[in-house]
Amino acid sequence: MNTPFKKIAQSLQDALPGDLADEVRSNLKILVEASLQKMNLVTREELVVQEKILARTREQLETLLARVEALEKDQQ
């Protein structure tokens, strides 16, 4: 699988002398990691856990709404 980023990285590596290419790669990696940390991203596992919590909360809400509707019908 050749992504555009891999193609760009390979082109840079081919064009630059070995030591310079390694330095550019290292600096770019540090820059990307710093940018990602600023974005306040979550891991896949955290996302899956939150999706499960949301699904359970929705189920509970639907159950409660049905109970409220039933109680309102009984009062009328």
Image (cartoon, rainbow, N blue to C red):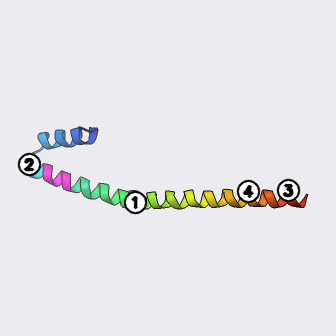
Q: Earlier in the sequence, mark 2 or mark 4?
A: 2
Q: Nearer the viewer, mark 2 or mark 4?
A: 4
Please say whether residue 24 is one of the residues in the magenta stretch: yes
Residue 73 disc label = 3
Nearest to the observer: residue 72 or residue 2: 72
| Lower sequence index among marks 3 and 4 | 4
Main secondary structure type of the part rendered in magenta: helix
Q: Quadrant of residue 63?
A: bottom right
Q: Write down the residue under mark 4.
A: 66
Q: Residue furthest front?
A: 74
Depth order, front residue of 26/59 = 59
28 relative position to 67: left or right = left
Q: Which residue is mark 1?
A: 45
The image shows residue 45 at horizontal and vertical percentages of: 40, 60
Q: Which residues are magenta?
A: 21-26
Callout 2: SS: helix
Residue at the image position 12 percent from the left and 44 percent from the top: 16
Cα–Cα span, label 3 and label 1: 42 Å
